[in-house]
Amino acid sequence: MTTYVLHDTDVLLKRSLRHILRSPDTIITTAITPIAMLLLFVYVFGGAIDVGGASYVNYLLPGILLITVASGIAYTAFRLFTDVSGGIFERFQSMPITRSAFLWGHVLTSVVANLTSLVLVVLVALAMGFRTGAGVLAWLAVIGIMLLFTLALTWLAVIPGLTAKTVDGVSGFSYPLIFLPFVSSAFVPTESMPGPVQWFAEHQPVTSIVNTIRSLFEQQPVGSDGWVALAWCVGLLLVAYALAMRTYRSKLA
């Protein structure tokens, strides 16, 4: 049974990746928004933002990485919506393939596409002066956190991809996710925010994830932020996966 699941998932993954390779502008477009934010905040606003004397591009990059993923998952939802609304979903239902392979093909495609976009953003940041002394283990930890975060948001994107009725509906869900980093420690220290806003910023998932990645890049102790970030990522992933599979089963019924 496991062999069939892996085979079917591999086939559908290759199908989705071929679609992306035929239109690489999808990955480029996904990376344009976070790269534009990186350029704007570093070169226009960076000089006016006090981050304790640190390089602002170093301070900003972790938040931009999260925005990159939030931008990318909108395309995941759109690709899934296109398959459902175009009749491919029903065609796959009538074929002897593992039902879960359809979703996993889209999810794994999202991971590959988002990791590619993240590499593009990091390369631009390096050209802008981003520097880190982080070792191999620290980089692996950063990649692990970003992978969990990407999977969590991707399974969340599956829900509107299956249920949306229009293109606007399927793409609109990602906007709050893109703007959430603005009310966090991604762009400015939370200490500079008014009381209620500061409380929200310090207790939402983006801040702990950003602080963890920033500490790893700076070779500083992660502290409690690491466990909080891990809990948020794993918790969001489990909840999103459960809701997505429940939505998928209702769609099959």
Image (cartoon, rainbow, N blue to C red):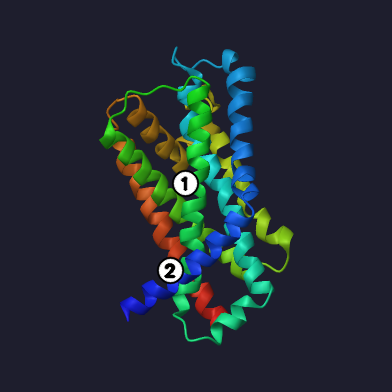
Up-down relation of residue 140 to residue 214 (above or below) = below
Q: Secondary structure at mark 1?
A: helix
The residue lying toward the viewer, choosing from 41 and 18, is 18
Left or right? Give the position of 174 relative to 192: right
The image's mark for residue 200 is none
The residue lying toward the viewer, choosing from 144 and 105, is 105
Q: Which residue is mark 2?
A: 10
Q: In which quadrant is the N terminus drawn?
A: bottom left
Task: Tell me which residue sits at (62%, 62%) in the image.
Answer: 79
Q: Nearer the viewer, mark 1 or mark 2?
A: 2
Task: Tell me which residue sits at (46%, 67%) in the image.
Answer: 104
Amino acid type at mark 2:
Asp
Q: CA distance from mark 1 to mark 2?
A: 18 Å
Up-down relation of residue 250 to residue 51 (above or below) = below
| Relative image position of residue 192 (x, y in whole percent) | 52, 22
Q: Secondary structure at mark 2?
A: helix
Which quadrant of the structure image shows residue 85?
Answer: bottom right
Left or right? Give the position of 186 relative to 77: left
| Relative image position of residue 20 (x, y in whole percent) | 59, 56
Q: Is residue 244 visible?
A: no
Left or right? Give the position of 72 relative to 54: right
N-term mark: 1 or 2: 2
Q: Residues within 10 Å of mark 1 (few under 14, many from 20)?
A: many
Task: Tell me which residue sits at (60%, 66%) in the image.
Answer: 80
| Relative image position of residue 178 (x, y in whole percent) | 59, 43
Q: How many numbered markers are drawn?
A: 2
Q: Is residue 135 visible?
A: yes
Left or right? Give the position of 66 relative to 222: right
Amino acid type at mark 1:
Leu
The image's mark for residue 115 is 1
